[in-house]
Image: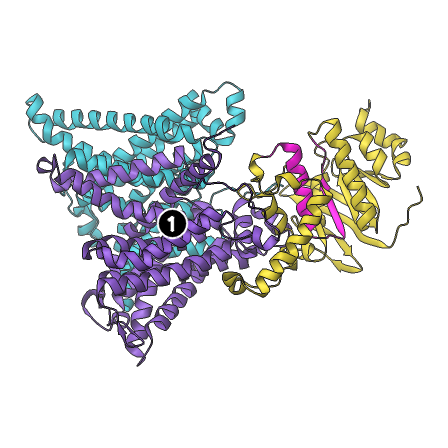
Amino acid sequence: MTFFLEVLIGGLLSGVLYALVALGFVLIFKASGVFNFAQGAMVFFAALTFVGFTEVLPGWTGLAQGTAGNFWLAFILALSSMIVLGIATERVVLRPLVNQPPITLFMVTIGLTFFIEGVAQGIWGSHVRGLNLGIEDVPVMFLLDNFDMIISQFDLIAAGIALVLFVTLALLFQYTKVGRALRAVADDHQAALSVGIPLKHIWAIVWSVAGFVALIAGLIWGARNGVQFALTFTALKALPVLILGGFTSVPGAIIGGLIIGASEKLAEVYLGPFVGGGIEGWFPYILAMLFLLVRPEGLFGEKHIDRV
Amino acid sequence: MARQFGDVVIDLQNISLRFGGVKALTDISFNVVEHEIRAIIGPNGAGKSSMLNVINGVYHPQEGNIIFRGQQRQKMEPYEAASQGIARTFQNIALFKGMSVLDNIMTGRNLMMKTSFLHHMLYWGKAQREEIEHRKKVEEVIDFLEIQSIRKTPVGRLPYGLQKRVELARALAAEPTLLLLDEPMAGMNVEEKQDMCRFILDVNDQFGTTIVLIEHDMGVVMDISDRVVVLDYGKKIGDGTPDEVKNDPKVIDAYLGTSH
Amino acid sequence: MFYREAGQFKASYQADSRIFPIRQDQIGFVALMAFLFLVVPFIANQYWLQAVLIPVLIFGLAALGLNILTGYAGQLSLGSAAFMAVGAFGTYNFMLRIDGMPFLVAILLGGLCAAAVGILFGLPSLRIKGFYLAVATLAAQFFIVWVLVKFGWFSNYSSSGVITAQRVNILGIDFRSPEMKYLLTLTVVTVLALLAKNMVRSSTGRKWMAVRDMDVAAEVIGIRLMRTKLQAFAISSFYCGVAGALYAYMYLGTVEPEGFNLDLSFKILFMIIIGGVGSIMGSFIGAAFIVLLPVLLNVAFHGSIGAFVPADLASNMELIIFGSLIIFFLIVEPHGLARLWQLAKEKLRLWPFPH
């Protein structure tokens, strides 16, 4: 039982990371109808840029690596890069494609994925790097002593950071003017435009926020598994998360992420041994595919009625 | 005008359609008889298009019966409706944008083409003969609707009025016995409307096709239709010949508004 | 001779629905085929045959398969490489396990295996559209490769699933030299491309395009969506499967499941975007482009300034250039190089009197 709980909690915590990536997808999809396949590449770009800055900054500023000053400076520079990247993407790539079929927009973001990956590695190099956030990946002693469970301290703190992020974003959307405008845009572009909401402005903000979310996801993920190209593949798992949660629902992204994270770990541990292991790689996709057959609109998505 | 009508083609009985909590149609009954031109009119949002969608199986009503050529059914699938001779056009043109006019109209005959993809791969013998035979039929429709000069043009490049005509051509290519037209004259100028009226009357006259049409232009409706159904807020408020409907106080209220 | 259609009148519908209705095009096509079959084997060297022509033909065939599904029937797939893998491993097993199995029958059967798997993974397309479907095809991509790695039976229990192509012998002729491999590949690809062209210009292709352009209207005129989509999945996967078999037998000789990864699927998708979505010829133009681009980049980087460009940067440049090209084409010319060719011909028709 303890082992089951360990696996379950470990899975849920890694699900938080899927949820973080999925959140970036949902934000952009809601606001602009673009299914941004490049969200995973953005996570990679963010993590690599952050690590790259922490490495080169000491040479420029004299701050030692590992100091808080160096950390925050690199964070700010990486965040600025993400915002520039987001706005540039919206301007250069997506604006000329307004009113194109969704499938075209989707394919263009696949091109964007390659571009971003190439640029990131072109600037910072392709070797695997460690990323240290100063949180140790050790079991939480309290749980180990009292419940005999091995739960990583790092995972718990990461989940905590993600939770703070989710709550902050939810509050911003609910109570600020920009948030209201955003929800209006998500509901109906034309109507939002007609009441004077600056659509392009909103899109720029959304892409920046998605960049910010990507940075947070990149930092946590990079610290967990190292900053490497494989990040982009793991980020693909946000796709089945979206199928489960629905493409337009933020709570859906979170719950979908948790379900995918938990179920793939449980499947690996309990089903894996019977078929030779390694099923984590495809389990989420097959799960999502089967789910699609039953409920194509996702757990929280809206049912769409075709009008003719 | 001595017109001959036949039996009831389709009889709609107590049709109700809901989308979630929204009632699109409530308890609507009317019939269409062979060879007539039946109009459905009503203000915007009255449920006219929903009615057509029920007839050819795009929407499935929660209640009511449809009796089509003596067979009772609660719902049909669109392809079943098509294979039993129901063809239609759409309010917002639903042509296949990436294909030429000719190919669009050829798709209208897909149900009559019996060869499989294995024949098509070889494009030889039976498949080629069939293709050419149907091409001849399609050319007849093209001649009938006077669109010879644009047959190889991609439909996306055509002006609105011509697109409407191509859509009618695709429906006619199926040689339907029941033709549903959803606002065939919306957005047309007077001359285009005249042409379209002429085509509709010719189709009805030459091929004996039964027609159900939705139209906003009252002049057109009163001129060409044999009987008219009036819908308002998803309910039937009038049914009869154009003259009867025109003088029905309930219909006049719905169109001109009343002080309740 | 000018490129003109003036004076060429069609007296029958048969003549009007030819693949190349204009006589100059017919002549051009026959000349191209004669060149490819009769001249190329004698003038091309080993490098050109093995590193350029054979892969272009094979990738072109795979791209054609994807184009049937995505370009004609409008269903996006990110799993083309997995269907290629099914074709390759299917063919291998038919060759291995049935004595005296003729190679051409084996690739046909391998293609049919791919078609069956394609139908299975196409089932979700009945409920979902567009990029939602991409996730289902990703499932195919990861699942199929995993199955081929994990279950040794498929690779005859070789380590990490590597298979080595058996020798190909048809009617006593050995297909071992690059020239013979090229000719066999060219023959298979030409036949399949013509069959595909015939399908897309007849009722089958019209149904696909109808479903692609407006599925509700297609249903209303009596097209069965389920049957049409699954048919497109099956035929598309068949083409990818045959391409996979040729990839193993005529190009690489030794393949492993991991070789048919997501990257290869993306490459094939890029071929159709650059070459032309919904164009048979575009599939091959796109394949040529994607195969030749790294070669050209290689020359550029290692030619004049080459000494200063590390290999690492060069491979990243490749990513950047691929990415930019995709974005560029989707924005500027969504129908790809095939459309540019079409436009050039239309201009040429009127030249030198454009008014």
For image coordinates 22% across by 34% down, the residue present is: A119
Please name the residue shown 39% across and 28% down the image. Answer: A171
Disc 1 chain ID: C
Q: Quadrant of the N terminus of chain C?
A: top left
The location of residue A135, given as percent across then percent down, is: 16, 38
Residue at image mark 1: C283
Residue B61 x/y as whole percent: 69, 49
Q: Is residue C173 left or right of residue B46?
A: left
Q: Which chain is drawn using yellow?
A: B
Query: What shade does chain C have?
Result: purple
Secondary structure type for disc 1: helix
Q: Which of A35 and B259 is in front in this view?
A: A35
Q: Residues within 10 Å of mark 1 (few under 14, many from 20)?
A: many
Where A185 falls versus A288 (above or below)? above
> What is the span of residues highlighted in magenta in the rendered image?
B158-186
Quadrant of residue C98 in the image?
bottom left
Q: The cyan chain is which one?
A: A
Figure quadrant of residue B109 = bottom right
Asked whether the viewer can see residue A218, the reply is no
What amino acid is at disc 1? Answer: Ser
